[in-house]
Amino acid sequence: MAAGSRALRTGERPGARIGDDARRRRRAGMLAAAFVLGFCLLPLAFLPLFAGIPPASPVALLADPYLRTVLGFTLLQAVLSTLLSVAFGVPLALALDRLRFPGRALLLRLFFLPQALPVLVGALGLITVFGRNGVVADAFVLAGLPRPSIYGLTGILVAHVFFNMPLVARLTLGGLSGVPAESWKIAGQLSLSRWATFRIVEWPVVRRTLGPAAGLVFMLCVTSFTLVLVLGGGPGATTLEVAIYQSLRYDFDPARALTLSLVQVGLVALLLLPTTGWTGGVDAGFGLAQASRRFDRRSVPAFAWDATVVATATAFLLAPLLAILVAGLQADLPRIVADPAFLAALSRSLAIAVAASILGLVLSAALAFGTSGAGRGGGILLSLSSSLVLVVPPIVVGAGWFLTLREIGDVARFAPAIVVIGNAILVVPYATRILAPEVAAVARRHGRLADHLGLRGFARLRHVEWPALRRPLALAGAFGMAVSLGDLGVVALFGNSDLVTLPYLLLQRMGSYRSTDAEGIALLLALLCLGLILLAERGLGGRKTPE
């Protein structure tokens, strides 16, 4: 009220001041978008000039049998992974929405864990369960069947379903929780059958969320790096990102690395264009879906089917997590914790994660506030810039900077800054999806009153926006730290004796066949990341949801 009174006494128009405030936020959003775009695209644009690497012609690209093989496998595994994740995730969401049982909220948090679990740790857990010496392989032998192999296309598909099936289920369940209560009451009053309820009430919601969920999973599988690196199993099971990494770390062929990077960017951009409007269902994956109060008819066979689906999915998700826990506890954890190499990797990982999380939050908040105050065209541009990491994945960004910085000086000098910025860019899509809906909701609820009172700048942030954004910021920050702690993309290229993070140390231990140490490090890394997420979601980042 004081701000509005001051404006009236001085003759200043509150609308003009609010307009200046909105313009500053738009400028901040544009600067954040320019920073993200520049960091991701400039190396690929200037690399041919700096390094003198001529771009390959399209004819030469199509004539290269290796590139055709890698490109074909990249698309094949992404398509199959998406189909399997959707085929298992949608029935799981329907079953979870239909069932009522104690511990439902806890189970939903379990389905959130694969998103927070470091990919390398999840891969190690899957190898422990489904590898040649795992429980599944022993069951095959008891049944008189040959031992299955986790490596190759089969292992990649299993791993992608492990990480992405819960994401599809949570996105679909978030949509189902938004079905009006009147729809369930009418379905109960009309005594609709299970099939009729699905066709009339559930399917329209599933159909709306199916596009965003499938599009997001497909992009995640196309840009998959760590899982394919660990489970690929040879040249016949290599994606574009792994081929870029191999071209730099093993063959050191900058021309091939640049060519593969440009093909990867072009492919992902081409695939992302049809899904630019599919944003509505993505945000639902970051919260707990509220249980719907249903009145439709339930039969014993239907209940048994739903319970079987939930139990099977829970066992599939719990098995690798329990394997990590059991194998990790068998390791000499006190010795690992006291190991100077582990302590150095832990301190570097935490320093990088904190710096990357802070920078990622600043960029994400600027994009979220800028998007809410921009026009339609500007809002679309800012929204797309927050998803640029899907178009230019971290391994491609890292390859571009690695090759560019080679022409300037010692790459190792720039490595820490590149790793921090790269991980911050990786945080932006997640943090923006958490913050943007809350910023828009605050603007809808309190925007007009704040404008009428002449609140702007720090006063508006402190009194209007901070109380509503404190919890989402905590969740976004914790999620960003967990993502950065478990990332291997940029560090895989820039990692050296002076820059060893926990995932890089874990990869080294796995590569040197020190499996016991690797399992102990995996457990400690998993507990660190999951502790951050659960602390933020339960204590800081989320509200308790009723059953």
Image: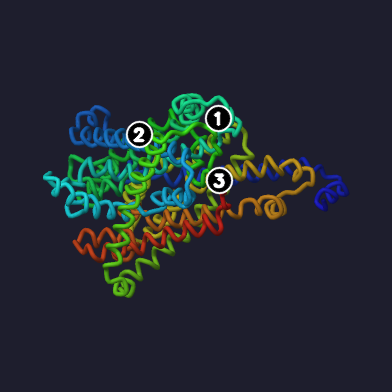
Give whichever of discs 2 and 1 has the lower sequence position. 2
Which residue reaches farthest front? 300
Q: CA distance from mark 2 to mark 3?
A: 41 Å
Q: Quadrant of residue 181?
A: top right
Contact, mark 2 vs mark 1 (Cβ under 8 Å):
no
Q: Residue at x 68, y 52 (%)?
A: 461
**What residue is shown with label 3?**
31
Q: Nearer the viewer, residue 422 or 402?
A: 422
Q: Which residue does the image show at 81% across and 42% down from the upper left?
A: 13
Element under disc 2: helix
Q: Amino acid at mark 3?
A: Leu
Q: Residue at x 36, y 61 (%)?
A: 525
**Is residue 20 shown left or right of residue 269?**
right
Residue 294 appears in the figure: yes
Residue 29 image-quadrant placement: top right
* Badge 3 or badge 1: first in the primary sequence: 3
Q: Which residue is mark 2?
A: 87
User: Which residue is under mark 1?
Assistant: 188
Q: Neighbour class for label 3 at 10 Å: few (<14), some, many (≥20)?
A: some
Question: Whole-percent x and y of residue 59?
Answer: 24, 27
Quarter of the figure with residue 494: bottom left
